[in-house]
Image (spheres, grey):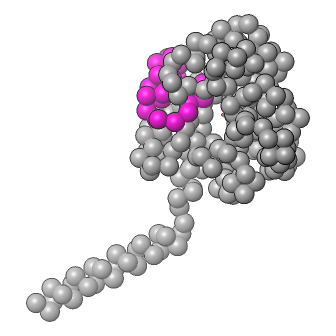
Amino acid sequence: MRLFLDTANLEEIREINRWGVLSGITTNPTLVSKENDDPEALWKEILAEVEGDVSLETTEPEADPMYKQGLHLAQMGPNAVVKVPMTPDGLEAGKRLVAEGIRINVTLVFSPAQAILAAEIGAYIVSPFLGRIDDVASDGMYALRQICEIYDIQGYDTNVLAASLRHPMHVVESAIAGADIATMPYDVFVKLVKHPLTDVGLQKFAQDWQALQRNLKGGA
Ligand code: E4P
């Protein structure tokens, strides 16, 4: 399962990138707005910062302007992936972009039925939003498992990207479900590496090593 960071913040991207585990970035209008910067300049910096896929989201609601915006976003870098929403206009624009050889990510997906539509237009990525499904007292992980099973049975090539992940167990369970990609905010990424027993173990190793150094010096 490829690990993506869900952010438009360059410092967060640089920190996770240095770990050597970052395979891509997802952005959305909310994440870009948080950076309070020129979106075009910011997207270019992000595209240059990572080798993997970077999802850039369209904001035009109607199919034709969305398609044209998608063409523009796609030419910003070879690793650009164009996000279109799961709406009739998003499907129309998305299918036209796919016909141009552009890789699209169908976003704001909340059900297996919507995921079937995304696969049928030849999307490169489908993004079910697990956390937001949980927020409305439904089961996001169950929806993800169904989508992965349907894609497997039907032989769809579309990559399933588990999105709106809120904690490390979302990541672990997405991997077990067979998701191709998991995208998560910076704080969830940081929690993946943390374990109290790692901290305790490291502290004990350091203490014992220092004690050895003192003993060796004392014995000399
Ligand atoms: C994915 O592409 C989305 O940007 C993201 O995962 C949404 O997550 P949220 O529900 O935490 O905003």
Q: Is 48 a magenta residue?
A: yes
Residue at the left extreme, as displayed: 220
**The residue stretch that appears in magenta:** 34-56
Residue at the front extreme, as displayed: 155
Nearest the eye: 202 or 22? 22
Location of the C terminus by quadrant is bottom left
Q: Position of residue 108 (x, y in %)?
A: 76, 31
| Quarter of the figure with residue 61 | top right
Residue 134 at least partly seen: no
Nearest the eye: 131 or 156? 156
Residue shown at the point (47%, 74%) measured from the top left: 200
Q: Along the horizontal axis of the image, is 213 left or right of 58? A: left
Residue shown at the point (65%, 44%) measured from the top left: 181
Q: Position of residue 201 (x, y in %)?
A: 45, 75
| Quarter of the figure with residue 128 | top right
Q: Position of residue 96 (x, y in %)?
A: 73, 14
Q: Quadrant of ligand 1?
A: top right
Q: Can you say whether 24 is above or below 208 in the image?
A: above
Residue 48 at least partly seen: yes
Q: What is the count of numbered marks?
A: 0
Q: Along the horizontal axis of the image, is 195 left or right of 41? A: right
Q: Is 109 a magenta residue?
A: no
Q: Along the horizontal axis of the image, is 145 left or right of 77? A: right
Residue shown at the point (45%, 49%) measured from the top left: 20
Residue shown at the point (21%, 89%) measured from the top left: 215
